Amino acid sequence: MGVQAIRPSSLKLFNRQWDSEQKMKQAYDRLVSFGFRVNLQGIAGLPVDDPLEDAIETVMGIQRIGPGSICSVYPLMIYAGTKMAGICEGWPRNKSSIGDTHTCACDLKFDCQEQLKNLCKLATFIVKYEIDESLVRVLISGCYDKVTEDLSMLRYKECVMDRLGSEGEQIFGDIIKTMELKF
């Protein structure tokens, strides 16, 4: 379920100004009541004055919407010819972004680039294990260069396991035998 962002001003970037956290929570609860397993999705690195605070608010909002749920938070990717490309015109671009969400490198360049990258990689665990915001702020300030591949694979495994239950372990093992991810 695409939450995308929590702040009303950020939701306007996605032409979703009618949405609110309350409405997203109601939609989530309704889906869950019908037995659906919901993957909540957000986007980090938006063209706003404080992209890190915006992203933290989004992850914590996703946690309030679906505590203990699985989630995926992706870095903003800008595609030519889209409304977002026009909105981002003039913003500095991140040269290390290769258009692959697994790297968690946002297309826009910010001083908080590493924290945004860490937040994307850790968001699945933050929401699923209901990690407190004060600990989130400590965790995203770390350097994870040596474990970035492990974090990415564990994040992916969490999503597969959540969706497929007990069969997920075997299926995940089969999938990663042929994968060539960039970290």
Image: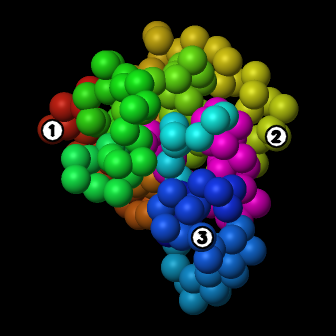
Q: Secondary structure at mark 3?
A: loop
Of the residues tagged 2 and 3, which is closer to the observer? 3
Rendered residue at 38%/60% (across/down): 167
Question: Which quarter of the figure is the C terminus placed in?
Answer: top left
* Alpha carbons under labels 3 and 1: distance apart: 41 Å
Q: Secondary structure at mark 1?
A: helix
Q: What kind of residue is marked 2?
A: Asp
* Alpha carbons under labels 2 and 3: distance apart: 28 Å
Rendered residue at 66%/34% (across/down): 50
Residue 81, x across and y down, in percent: 22, 53
- Reading the image, the residue beneath label 1 is 178
Is the residue marked by circle 3 packed among few (<14), some (14-19), or many (20+) residues within 10 Å? few
Is the residue marked by circle 2 packed among few (<14), some (14-19), or many (20+) residues within 10 Å? few
Of residue 173 and residue 130, the one placed in the foreground of this image is 130
Q: What kind of residue is marked 1?
A: Thr
160 w.r.t. 149: above or below: below
- Reading the image, the residue beneath label 3 is 17
- Reading the image, the residue beneath label 2 is 132
* Alpha carbons under labels 2 and 1: distance apart: 36 Å
Magenta highlight range = 51-76
The mark that comes first in sequence, 2 or 1, is 2
